[in-house]
Image: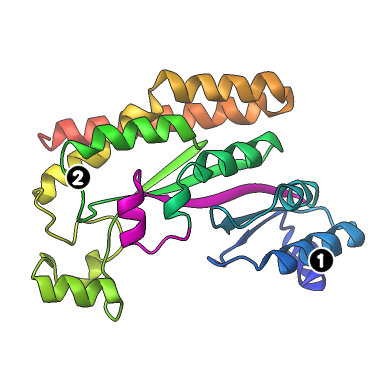
Amino acid sequence: MIDEIRFLQSEYDVNTLNLRDETFGPESVVRAFCLKLLKSEVKVKWRAFAVVGTIKPETVQLMAEAGCHMLFYGIEASDSETLRLRHKSFARHIDQVAKDIALAQSHGIFVRGGFIVGHETDTEATFSRHLEFLKQVHPDELYISFLTPFPGTPLFTRAERDGIIRERDWRKYDCEHPILDVGIPADELVRLRRELYHSYYTSHEWHSHLQSRIAKRPEEETTIRRYTQFIDGRLKMANSFAIANGS
């Protein structure tokens, strides 16, 4: 793999790698990769997926030293019951989410948190809990998707059995459209997701967290300033779109 990275750098001037392995690991493989990368003296930034509760602190430090600049953690939900429905290994230890995110951030790693809405347990009221939970664990970036029952999965089988699949247009099975009928109208789910994004990115907690990162790691200031400007632009575009469509 090191030779492949060298090739990408020499032929295409690649300086960042996105390791799209959703089960990046096991930990012994991650450590071996980092050690080989450090020994090779190849300078490259890279990002990867990570599972809450599976990476030891010393490995996270090694990853940062080897060039890891972003981790994508699947947070998925704000309560243990829903995490159990999604068969998440950390369902009984939901407090580990905040610990793992804080650990990565302490080593200068940017954390993107994946969150899902449209669970069977969701109601309009649970979105307030989602927001409070996210403000407590404060990922640097947030990606919110809709629960999507891909054909062939146990979730699809259960949803079909229970008669809660409301959308059969496979083009919409992209995690960006509400597919399941969980008791909330589809257009309302879209609005609630948009509001969750907006409330998180405009919260005092998120902005305070970024200011704290800058205070601890001044070298990140330019990157964080540009990132917040990007988010502000996205929020304005989303609001304009919502107003134009009367939602």
Q: Is residue 131 above or below residue 172?
A: above
> Tag 1's secondary structure?
helix
**Colour scheme of the picture:** rainbow
Between 15 and 180, which is closer to the camera in this rendering? 180
The tag earlier along the polypeptide, 2 or 1, is 1
Q: Residue at x 72, y 63 (%)?
A: 30
| Residue 72 position within the rendered picture, expressed as x and y whole percent measured from the top left | 53, 51
Boundaries of the magenta span:
67-89
> Tag 2's secondary structure?
helix
| Residue 146 position within the rendered picture, expressed as x and y whole percent measured from the top left | 28, 54
Question: Quick check: is 72 in the magenta stretch?
Answer: yes
Q: Is residue 215 above or below residue 24?
A: above
Q: Is residue 145 visible?
A: no
Q: Residue at x 9, y 34 (%)?
A: 246
Q: Is residue 182 above or below residue 213?
A: below
Q: Which mark is residue 46?
A: none
Q: Is residue 109 above or below residue 35?
A: above
* Residue 10: quarter of image: bottom right
Viewport quadrant of the C terminus: top left
Mark 1 is surrounded, within 10 Å at the Cα level, by few (under 14), some (14 to 19) or many (20 or more) other residues, namely some
From mark 2 to mark 1, how far is it between C-alphas? 43 Å
Between 83 and 67, which is closer to the camera in this rendering? 83
Mark 2: which amino acid?
Val
Q: Residue at x 35, y 30 (%)?
A: 132
Q: Which residue is mark 2?
A: 190
Viewport quadrant of the N terminus: bottom right
**Image side of residue 197 versus residue 7, left or right:** left
* Residue 238: quarter of image: top left
Q: Which mark is residue 6?
A: 1
